[in-house]
Amino acid sequence: MVTRLSASDASFYHLENTATPMYVGSLSILRKPRAGLSYDTLLETVERRLPQIPRYRQKIREVTLGLARPVWVDDPDFDITYHVRRSALPSPGSDVQLHELIARLGSRPLDRSRPLWEMYLIEGLAKNRIAIYTKSHQALVNGMTALEIGHVIADRTQKPPAFGEDIWIPGREPTNGQLLLGAVGEWLARPTMQLQAVQSTISDVVTNSGELADLARRLTDVARTVARGTAPNSPLNTKVSRNRRFTVATGSLADYRLVRSRYDCDVNDVVLAVIAGALRNWLLSRGEPVTTSLTVRAMAPTSVYPEADLDSSSGPGQAISEVAPFLVDLPVGEGNAVVRLSQIAHATESHSAAASLVDARTIVTLSGFAPPTLHAMGTRVATQFSARQFNLLITNVPGPQSQMYVAGTKLLETYAVPPLLHNQVLAIGVTSYCGNLYFGINADRDAMSDVEVLPSLLAESLEELLEAAQ
C-alpha cells in the first residue's frame, strides 16, 4: 500500500540532520523474571503487535526531483530481527554504563532504506534488571493513525492478551517511474483537491459553532505564542554536536502532590518549578551571571484529558483530546523557590489548553502504555515553532498509576529520551508512572559535559519546596 506522507511527517523527515536526528527514544527498566526475558520472547511480542502499528513495516521512498512529498510503502524485505536487537553491559552493569550506552545508541542515525525504528534488549544490568531501549522516527508517530511501539507492547496484566494470527503480505513496491507518474498526476489534480478541501472546511466551520469556537481559540494561541518573540540568550543554546549524554532522575509523585496541595496549583506547575530551580543552580555552578530577572523559556506541551488533570491515575484507556503547545518563562533568576512556583502557576493559569496547533487529536481511547506516544506528540508540537522562540523542550506526560508489563515482565521505571532540536543542547522528558515521576535528560555531549549534576540539582530543588510546604 502506498500512502503519501502528510506535510507534517514530511517536514520531520527532511528537517533532521546528522546533529539533530528527529526520533523519539524511550528507556524501560524491567525486573528480570526468574526464567529471564529471552530475545525470542521479546521478538514474538513485538511481532504480534505490529498489526496495530502498520507504519513499522513500511519504509519511506522519495519521489524523483522532489516533485511531491515522499510516500510510505511496504518494505518487501522487512526483517524484524534487524530492528529488534540484543545488547549487553559487562555484568553487573551499572546505571551509569546503561546511560552511556543509551547516549551512544541515540547518537546513531537510523537506516533510511528501512523502516525507521530500532529496539534493543539490554542485558547484564545490575540488581536483577533488564532494559529495553527503543527509538522511532518522529515521522512514524502522529498520535492518530500511528502510535509509538512502546505504546502497544505494554500490558496491564502479566499474562499478555491473545492475538490472532498475523498473515502479512507486503504490497508490491512501486518503481521510480510509477512514483513520478503519481506525483505528476497529483500535481495536475491539486487545484481541484484544494478547492474541495477548502469547501469542506468552510462547510464544517459554518455549520458547527463548536468548531468555530475551537478555531478562534487556536488562532488566539498562535498569536499569543508568536508574540512571545525570540527566547532569552542562554548557554543552553549553542551548536549541537553528533554525540549525546543521557542521565535520569526520579521523584515521588506524592511529594509533588504535597506541594501542589499546599500551594493550590497543578503538579505540572511543581514539575516546572523544580526544573527551574535545578537550572538556576546549574547556571550558578558554571559561574554564569544570574540576575534576578533572568528567565529560561521552555516549550512545555500539555497533554489534555477531557475529564482528568495531569496527575490523574486514569492514564491510558481514557480519552485524550490533544496535546497543546505552551511556552513558559522559567524564573531562574528568582532565588525563592516558592516565588518561582507562584510565578509559574500564574503563567499557566492564563494558558488555554483547549487548542492544538498540529494534528495531535488521537483515537478516542488510548489502550496500552500511552506515554511514549504522548512524548512524541509533544515533540511534534514543539517543532511547529522556531527553535529560536524557546531555550529547551520539556515534555511532561501522564502515565498509568498501576503496574504494567512487557512480555509478562514487570515494568519498573520508564524514561523518555527526547530529541535535541536545532541549537538546543538540553531536552527533558518527564513521565508519571506507578506513583513516581521519571525524568529522562538528554543533552549534547560537548556543550553539557556536566549534565550528570542535574539529577542531584532536581532533588535539591524539590527539597526546597517540600521544606517550605511544611
Image: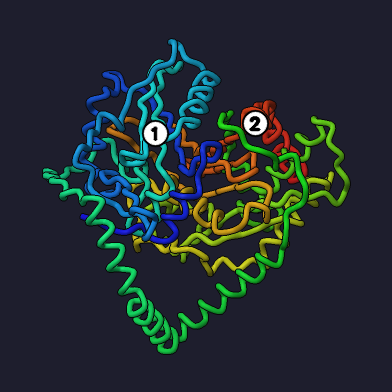
Mark number, residue 163: none
Q: Position of residue 394 (x, y in %)?
A: 60, 47
Disc 1 residue type? Leu
Which part of the image, by quadrant, shows the N terminus? Answer: bottom left
Can you say whether 13 is above or below 19 in the image?
A: below
Give how far apart the Cα atoms at labels 1 and 2 are: 21 Å
The label nearer to you, 1 versus 2, is 2
- The residue lying toward the viewer, choosing from 6 and 435, is 6
In the image, residue 71 above or below residue 237? below
Q: Give the labeled residue for mark 1.
A: 411
Q: Which residue is at 64% across, 66% downward? A: 351
Quick one: 169 or 192, which is closer to the camera? Answer: 192
Percent position (x, y) of residue 456? 68, 29
> Closest to the observer: 172 or 52?
172
The disc, 1 or 2, on the residue closer to the chain's N-terminal end is: 1
Left or right of 91? Residue 152 is: left
Left or right: 69 in relation to 253? left
Single out the residue that lies furthest toward the bottom: 206
Q: Residue at x 61, y 59 (%)?
A: 326
**Residue at image location 41% in from the left, 55% down from the top:** 9
Within-10-Å neighbours for mark 2: few <14, some 14–19, many 20+: many
Q: Amino acid at mark 2?
A: Pro
Disc marking residue 455: 2
Left or right of 152, for residue 291:
right
Element under disc 1: strand
Occupied quadrant, residue 79: top left
In-front residue for pair 386/358 = 386
In x, y percent, where is residue 93?
47, 14
Residue ID at (49%, 83%): 212
